Structure formats: structure tokens, C-alpha cells
Image: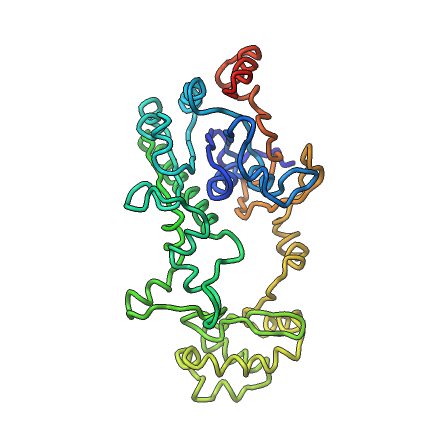
Amino acid sequence: MNEQKGALSGLRILDLTRVLAGPFCTMMLADMGAEVIKIEEPGKGDDSRHFAPFQNGESAYYMNLNRNKKGVTLNLKGKGRELFLSLAETADVVVENYRPGTMDKLGLGYETLKAINPRLVYAAISGFGNTGPYRLRAGYDIIGQAMGGLMSTTGWPDGEPTRTGTAIGDVLGGLSVAIGVLAALRHRDLTGEGQMVDVSLVDSVVASLEIITQIYLTEGRIPGRIGNRYESVYPYDSFRANDGSIVIGAGNDKLWHLVCSVIGRPDLAADERFDSNPKRVKRHAEVKPLVEAWTQLHSIDEIVEKMLAAGVPAAPINTIDRLVKDPHIAVAREMFVNVTHPKAGETKLTGSHIKMSATPSAIRTPSPELGQHNGEVYGEILGLSEKEILALRQEGVL
């Protein structure tokens, strides 16, 4: 494990989140060195502890999203509420992903916490945010992708609206919360004042649509499903090889000329049907088979090598077995990291995608067992004795 301190070393974050969007946010902050104290329900814990896949009975889903965190248990009602308030006095950040209003009902909402710790940054992530007529609706990734418009533009013209292969709505929400927290901490450092960060899964998906919404807002055209091509340039699409598929990103006329040279059709570069990008976008259905007539005769690696050698952006559509063995991604960029877990044993987790030269992000500790750090957190931070901690556990508070 890497013992070097991260960029966020010295920050204390109370993590009340569960499953994916919130834990993804706090995972990034923990990877960057923050002390993240994950607070879970006694006897049960985060739902994702019970999500497949498993290694030696331990959820790899949970292990990946909760590395580098300290784990405690706490019932937020009764005596547990007072313990949380005491922890919040010492914290820099609280992150929660309950339905809006839940924390207020517990007497632990932002205004309550702000009164005891004005410097606190309070981050809330939910399906629809803390304002608006939909605020109390349940929010899941598939809801965010559907309501945010992403599914309507994902897939093939003759197919059904399609959810992306990963829970991208949750991931976008987690990224957005992390950015908001860091911005709020910057403001806090300048002014001494904390604030609330309110992020919605749906808003996060909407923000990611970039050109899709602008097409409608400027042209009045409703974008539909167009497969793997892009609305603005062509050829910018997937193409079949003889052993799989590749993508080519020819984003301008110069690159189109290079593609034509590689595929042995220099005549196409001068063809008045295809000699400008707008024409190729309009005639994409004609361009694709012309390129594919060549790509289907070659392997993935042959095509990518020839395109890259000519200066054309191209890449394999990696299946996951290829991805985890890729010498650049897996080795040079360290995107898959060996970790030793006390129960799961030797396992691989996805590494941090944020590379920093002086304070590198790293996986320093495995995910915690349920309540693993109760003694350390409640003893060292709140000064409770072992006897007091034991009594609280017996009462169901911890």
C-alpha cells in the first residue's frame, strides 16, 4: 500500500452515503488523502455489501468503492444523533445521499449542522435535488439516465432507448459532488464559511448532454438515436474488423484524406459527395460501408496500427479482458491495482484516474469491515472509553 500523504490529507469527511453515487464521490476524496469516515447502519451496513460479484464472500462492488475509508456503525436516532453531532463538530465535510428531507427529520439537516459548525461543507446528492416539484421522488441511476434525456439518444435508430453499460448517471453525480465539495472548501478557506452543495443525478446527466440539448435549442430538431456516430463530424464512428470492432475519429477534412489513403481509396477524398465534413455528416450512411469494405478485411490491431501510423485517431473497442491487460491503461497508468483485503485476500481494484505529481492518489487501505473502526473513531475523536463503546454497541447505538 502507498503510505504517501495525498493532496486532501488533513480533511475529515463524514460519509453517510450508500451504494454508488455518494460512495464514488467519497472514494475519490479518500484516494486523494482525505480521512473519510463511512457511517453505516448497525448490523446491516451499506446495501452494496450484499452486491455481486463476491470474492471469498466479500463484495467486490463494496471493496472497490469504499477503499481508503474508515468504517463505523451508528444509529442516527436517539443517542446516535448526539454522537453524530459531536463528530460533525470536528468534520470539514458531510456527504449524504438520503431522499431530501430525511436528514431534517432526524434533526441532522444542514441548518442544524451549520449552527454547530459554520465551516462545515454539507453535500447532498439525490435523484432530483433539494428543490423543485420532483424533489421527493426516488432517484436511481436508470431514472437519471431516462429523465435526463440520455437514454433517448443512446442506441440504434431502429432499437429501444438504451441505458449505458455502466451506471453513468450515478458516476456523473458522484463526480459532480466531488467537484462541488472541493469548490466549497476553497470558498471556506477564503471566507471561513461553509455551504451546502446540492447535486441531482438528473441534473448531472443533463449537464453531460453537451451538443444534444444545443441541437434542439438552436435548430428545434429533436436528436434521436444514431448508434456510435457523432452528430457533428464524420467518419467518427465504429467499424467492423474481421475479429471485432474499432473506432475511427476523423474530426476534420485533413484526417478524412488520411483515412482515404490508408484504405486505398484516395479518390474518395476528392469526391464531391464527401469532400467536406458537412457533406460526410449528411451522407454518413454512404461513407460507412466504403470505409468498412476495407476494415472488414483486417484485424482490430492491424487497423489501429495502420490508422495511428498515418496520424488518424483510432482505437479498438476493447472487451474487458483486453482492457485489463492493456499495457498503457493497466500497467503504465496503473488503472488496476493489487490490494490485499483481510477477508477477500488478494484482489484487484480499479485505480484512481486522477494522477498528481506531488501528492499522488493511491489505494492505501482496503475497504473496512462493518464497524471496524468504531474503537478508533469514537475513542480517539470523541474520547469514549472501551466500556462506553461496548455499552453503546449493546444498546444498538453502534
Find residue 374 and report its image quarter.
top right
Say which quarter of the image contains residue 245: bottom right
* Residue at 61% in and 72% down: 309
> What colour scheme does the image use?
rainbow
Q: x and y percent of residue 104 in the render?
A: 34, 30
On the picture, is 179 further left or further right than 300?
left
Q: Can residue 37 be seen in this snapshot?
A: no
Q: How many marks?
A: 0
Relative height, residue 323 to residue 304 (above, below) = above
Percent coordinates x, y for residue 253 in the rendering: 45, 78
Residue toward you, 367 or 316: 367
The answer to whether 212 is drawn above or below residue 17 in the figure is below
Name the one closer to the observer, 102 or 281: 102
Q: Is residue 304 above or below residue 141?
A: below
Relative horizontal placement of residue 374, taking residue 302 as reference (left or right):
left
- Asked which quadrant contains residue 360, the reply is top right
Q: Residue at x 41, y 42 (%)?
A: 177
272 or 56, nearer to the observer? 56
Is residue 213 at all visible to an observer of this figure?
yes
- Whether residue 218 is situated above or below residue 339 in the rendered picture: below
The quadrant of the rendering that contains the N terminus is top right
In x, y percent, where is residue 154? 46, 64
Front residue of 172 and 18? 18
The residue positioned 35% from the left and 29% from the top of the image is 105
* Residue 280: image location, x then y, percent: 44, 80
